[in-house]
Image (cartoon, helix red, strand yellow):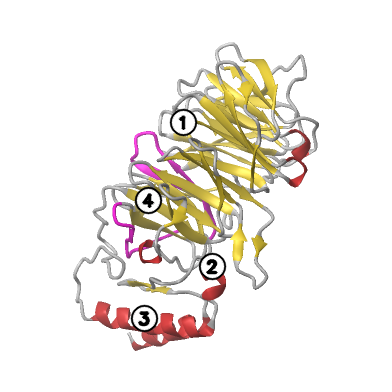
Amino acid sequence: MNTLFILLVRRLLAGTVSAIADSSFVIIAFFNDIPINFMSFYRNSSWRLLTCLMALVSLSFCLSCGNNNYNGYGYASPSSTSGYKHRILVSNSYVGSLLIINAVNNFLYGRPITVSPQPQYLALSHDGKFTLSYSNSADTLYYFDNSQEQVTGNNISLSGDVESLGILSNNTTAITASRNAPVNGGANGVIYFLDLTNRVISQAIAVPLVRRVVLDSGGNTVLAFADNTNYVYLVNTTANTATAIPDPNGVLDRPVNAVFSSDGSTAYILSCGAECGGTQAKVTTYNVGSNSFGNSVDVSGATAGVLDSSGNLWVAGSPNGVGYLQSISTSSLTPSAPVAITNGYHNLLTVADDNRLYVGAKTCSNIADQIGNPIQGCLSIYNMSSGNVVKAAMTGDVTGLQADIGQHQVFATQGGYLVIYNTTNDQPLPQSQQIAISGQAYAVLQIS
């Protein structure tokens, strides 16, 4: 135990981590009064020393607790489960772990679940019994049992990085795409079918430079998107094939994503246009039953989208380095005037409480004031009632967004940090209600 105590001191003083774990306990450092620009603030040596002292006090407290099952932030038996009913799962990309948060009171459960570093993508099964986690550093898929709160069974190894992950309606097959997976005698790019019962690759389909798969909410229809092409591929999950959808009129222009209607009968294809080397960003309807494209409408940008409760489609993009958000009536395909938001490659949109829309991007133009404090990053918050836009001060890529419906909060992973926002005022919750994760928070997903 003395060795662990010394290790804790050394790592905290080095500023590398604030959580040290062995087989019997975890110490998590919590910060109560750090301002929102804590990225640079925490690096200050005086705060690092104070953090160290706080952690040592927590350590002495935990050592005096014996083997009690403490399910808050602190001690937890490795064999126990959290007991939380309302759970948020967060991946720690740097350390290689999954963390469980009680979304009712924003407490972090004290037992991380170990996976390989860079667990960057999470997918929840349709029956809610398990969550898949993919680690790009090891190109490995992990099966997290939501009831046992641990990784179970064998892992599945692939041959490349992924940027999307889905589960079919049977809950026994997963599907993903890897742009850099090698193909003998051809260009890189593979769509993988994954047998979750036997934990093996059941089928690998070569599609050059395929980057993304998009599924309807029921996991019945799968579309695939590849780089530098004007095709969208329909993936046949029975025959295990991927076929380009006919586009006789050439309406698509660098398609990169899709949003399905709630019943899965229609998909809205998002063409990136000029932002991705094409000409014009647009949205095109796709009829699943007839496997055909319908009408299109030009928009300012379209790399990501979401449907709101009224059936309006919201799309975001950054033509010419300027970020825009637009709504489209799905009944008439009539677009609204574009609204300026933060720029970058928009990859995440989610509808939240209080009629809010959260829009996340990567590689945006982060802005700081004259003394280096962040004042604008990659996250935009749009009030769909008033039309007001808040450009959040936190800087760095937005890699995860999870609206916690009914709790009036949104969990955002940005720049390696987890920030919890209050949807009633578009601001982060007080620091006493934030959770400091040692490492790099990357993906976030509600699992119950």
Is residue 99 visible from the viewing direction of this image? yes
Q: Give the range drawn in magenta.
A: 104-132
- Among numbered discs 1 and 4, the one appearing first in the sequence: 4
Q: Specify whether 174 is left or right of 206.
A: left
Q: Element under label 3?
A: helix
Three-letter amino acid code at disc 2? Asn
The image quadrant that residue 281 belongs to is top right
Q: Does the magenta stretch include residue 216?
A: no
Q: Mark 1 points at which residue?
A: 168
Three-letter amino acid code at disc 1? Leu
Three-letter amino acid code at disc 4? Ile
Q: Mark 3 points at which residue?
A: 54
Q: In which quarter of the image is the N terminus?
A: bottom left
Residue 175, percent from left and from top? 53, 36
Instruction: Look at the numbered discs 1 and 3 and tell me whether their residues touch, using CB distance below 8 Å.
Output: no
Residue 37's tag is: 2
The image quadrant that residue 387 belongs to is top right
- Among numbered discs 4 and 2, the one appearing first in the sequence: 2
Is residue 206 visible from the viewing direction of this image? no
Residue 149, percent from left and from top? 32, 53
Residue 309, percent from left and from top? 44, 28
Residue 88's tag is: 4
Structural crowding at the residue carrying mark 4, measured as other residues with C-alpha within 10 Å and reported as few (<14), some (14–19) or many (≥20): many
**Comparing marks 3 and 4, which lies closer to the viewer?**
3
Instruction: Look at the numbered discs 4 and 2 and tell me whether their residues touch, using CB distance below 8 Å.
Output: no
